[in-house]
Image: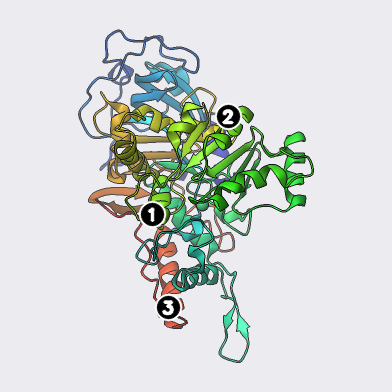
Amino acid sequence: MATFRFPVHLLLGSVVAVGCSQEWVATPSNPLPIFDNDDVGKPVGAGGSSSSGGTSGGGQTPGPCVGDPGTPEIVRLGKVPGKTVLVGCVVTPQGAINGSVFISSDTIVCVGASCTDDPDAADATVVRTHGVIMPGMIDTHNHILFDIFNEEDWSPEKLYQNHDEWPNEPRYGAMVDAKQWLNGELALPDGNGGTAKITDPRGCELNKYGEMKGLIAGTTSIVGSANPLDKICYGSLARTIDQKSNDLPDDKVQVATLTPSKATGDAVCQKFVDDLTDAYVIHRGEGVDEYSRAEFDKLGTLTTEPGCLYAPETTVVHGTAFGEAEFQTMADKGMSLVWSPRSNVFLYGGGTDYTKTTDIKMALGMGINVALAPDWSLGGSQNLLDELKFAQEVDKNRWNGELFTPEMLVDMVTINAAKVLGLDKVLGSIEVGKKADITVISGDVTKPYDTIVGANPNDVSLVMVNGIVLVGDAVLEEAGPKWVACESLDICGVPKFACVAEAEGTDSDKLKQTWAEITTVLSTELEAFDARDLTAWDFAPLAPLVKCK
Ligand SMILES: [Zn+2]
């Protein structure tokens, strides 16, 4: 997100007088509810664990979550934007508690039994969620510009042994051409004997499409590997966490798909020393053969100082071909692992052989930090909620369902993922002082982790990035920003809203595009590419934002 996404008056909260157009205005059809602090945020649970580090506020002891049936509701509209209290079952590092979270500007400032009692929250908007309030999910492995495609555009023609085999297939190549044409990477015949690239490259729209796929499913940060790097337009919707426009002070995340050159490897090691890189996230060992396994050895030998990339900053994406020796080195060196099971089983296991994905049981047994991520929507999961379910499926089929608890899986898409990126002090949990990236899931709050793992995008009732509600149930639209009209979306039969266009966006940075404009542009360009009839295959329409169950 661009740094200007959060208007200055929001950053300063209520101490700055704001114009009428920026205030929350009660209308006859939507009167300001009469609100009494006693009505909201009371712990309805009895007893339970006491709050510890990372929570503050309320002066009451938060209890375990107890049933709170109902649909999400705005209990009070605040007088100024930028302050929100979410009431419900809060997933904290100490477990799920019955309580509330107070967000001021882009930061979590209270987590506890009753943050509504915080004097500074007196003018906040209060949302009673009747649901599970969890950290926004973090996708540590995606190829976001490909997320307009799915397996109807290309699927494996056979079982593969490694990641160098399938890119050679003509249909896969044709699909890559379509992506590269839209993104302005590829020149095509211009009809006058020469070649030309697309007049207006659509990388911004491609990136936003992928971010939106994540956002509606509760994902608030995505490692998307978009290129070219650091475009301003990446600064909207979910955080483009591996690039500068991530709304954080620094970008210390480096991503690599291929084996780096010696010079690049040496430069990465130097950046570790100089504290310029906190996370080096590199694909290694994607496949099931010795060729794939040996990529781990190559990582250790390619640099001038052997083994300098075997470091706590380095995360291996995949590790599918790894065995005890590789995982032992990773554990000894404090390296992390990103696991993408559905993509692995799709490419190397015919969609059904669950042994053709990484031996996560072994990795976990050695104490390696593991995050879970989709890879892309092309045979990988369309979002993290689906990937959570696939991880459970692998567990059931390969390890008798005894490997993961739902809580472990939730950690793998939140705090473990933040650790992968070296951002666990900033993101990945609901704690005072962290950035306000929060997802709310409707469902049974007495089993909050099961509810999260079992959720689908229609159950995602609110998603907040950097303190701003960008997506949610239609009934919560008043809690969203008012800078531009938000748009209505139907997500698997449930009416939602999405706030995509930014008031301060321009034509050139593309931040003022609406969701309707983004999808229209991409559809039109993809159809125009198909109309050139360069190959036997067509790639329109766009893969759906969500394929409903
Ligand atoms: Zn990948």
Q: Nearer the viewer, mark 2 or mark 3?
A: 2
Horizontal side of 148 relative to 326 (left or right) equals left
- Of 14 and 257, nearer the camera is 257
Query: Is residue 127 among what the camera can see?
Result: no
Q: Which residue is mark 3?
A: 530
Mark nearer the viewer, 3 or 1: 1
Mark closest to the chain's N terminus, 2 or 3: 2
The residue shown at (40%, 40%) is 463
Q: Position of residue 305 (x, y in %)?
A: 78, 40
- Helix, strand or loop under label 3: helix
- Residue 154 horizontal/vertical position (percent): 40, 66
Camera-nearest residue between 226 and 44 = 226
Q: Amino acid at mark 3?
A: Asp
Q: Which residue is mark 1?
A: 346
* Cα distance in 3D space between marks 3 and 1: 26 Å
Image mark for residue 331? 2
Q: Quadrant of residue 325?
A: top right
Amino acid at pointer 2: Ala
Closer to the chain start, of discs 3 and 1, is 1
Q: Residue at x 22, y 51 (%)?
A: 493
Could you tell me which secondary element the residue under label 1 belongs to?
A: helix
Q: Earlier in the sequence, mark 1 or mark 2?
A: 2
